Image (tube, helix red, strand yellow):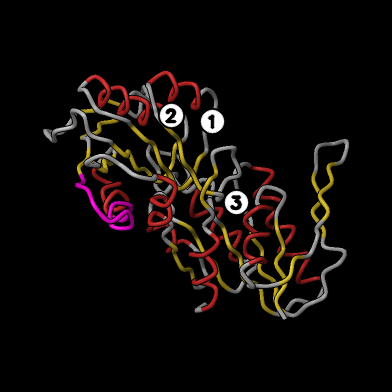
Amino acid sequence: MTTLVPSSTTQSLAASLAAAGVGSLTTPTYDRFADGETLAAVPEFDDDHAIIVASTVDNDAHIELLQLQDAVREAGASDVTTVIPYLGYGRQDTAFKAGQPISARAVARAISTGTDRVVLVDPHEPSVADFFDVPTRIVSAAGLLAEPLGDLDDPLFVAPDAGAIELAETTRDAYGSGETDYFEKERDYDTGEVELTPSDAAVAGRDIVVVDDIIATGGTMSGAIAVLNDRGAGRVFAVCVHPVLAGAARTKLAAAGVERLIGTDTIERPISDVSVAPAVADALDTK
């Protein structure tokens, strides 16, 4: 027997995993006290194997994950798998200035204390898997992003920087046709400003799919979309694995002229049209 334990931030994906036959669902409780402290509990849990499904989208979600790990152990689980569809602090994988922490390492070490293994979905830097003290597997969901695109006209799959070209290639391969390219991107870490330099690929009249792992503030993606539209692209789609969409990101993308925005359920958003459940379920079968 296996029981899926969803965090409050990742209920849709856990339900999809249950529907795929990964395990049965338990219903945790999530409370907040007057002093701001939270309490996640599993009053109905009664199993040897727990799969906790929790995207750590904010600080509360990190604490909730640690509490769920401890709660299932307290309830008798002898084997715990932790699925983290979106790993918060995953982009803080190095100390960028003197005196700064490596936050990804700090959270990974904390999570490792309460689990036997970890499954991650497309972390921004794959090397963060090395920070965990338990066996850690990375699942790619980029191939799933092609399904909702429909019929495209002479498509070009573009990464907003060289680091995302593999995601663009995977999405293109899943779609079945098209070319790939990427923008040159330079970020000023003091000001946060990003400069995008277009490639020489022909875009006029073509359907363009801009592929990235994360859309956070929308600055990089909206900049890329605006450049493509200025160069006479046909329709421009934006797809990502993790739709963080912080602040005015959705508005920025709309103002830039995006045709459609597609994300997955690693983070539950209105544009989470793709479930990563099939990829995660395959990984859990071979854990």
User: Does residue 73 appear to the left or right of 279 in the view shown?
Assistant: right
Q: Is the N terminus in the top left, top right, bottom left or bottom right quadrant?
A: bottom right
> Distance between the Cα atoms at labels 3 and 2?
20 Å
* Secondary structure at numbered mark 1: loop
The residue segment tinted magenta is 170-180
* Residue under numbered circle 3: 55
Residue depicted at 22% across the width and 34% down the height: 206
- Residue 230: % across, % down: 24, 19
* Residue under numbered circle 1: 246
* Callouts 1 and 2 close, C-beta under 8 Å: yes
Task: Please determine whether, in this image, residue 74 is positioned above or below residue 85.
Answer: below
Q: Would you call the spot at circle 3 few (<14 residues within 10 Å), some (14-19), or many (20 or more)?
A: many
Q: Given the image, on which type of amino acid does mark 2 rest?
A: Gly
Query: First in sequence: mark 1 or mark 2?
Result: 2
Q: Given the image, on which type of amino acid does mark 1 rest?
A: Ala
- Of residues 201 and 45, the one nearer the viewer is 201
Q: Given the image, on which type of amino acid does mark 3 rest?
A: Ser
> Distance between the Cα atoms at labels 3 and 1?
15 Å
Task: Please determine whether, in this image, residue 268 is positioned above or below residue 277.
Answer: above
* Residue under numbered circle 2: 218
Tell me which corner region of the image, top left, top right, bottom left or bottom right, holds residue 113: bottom right
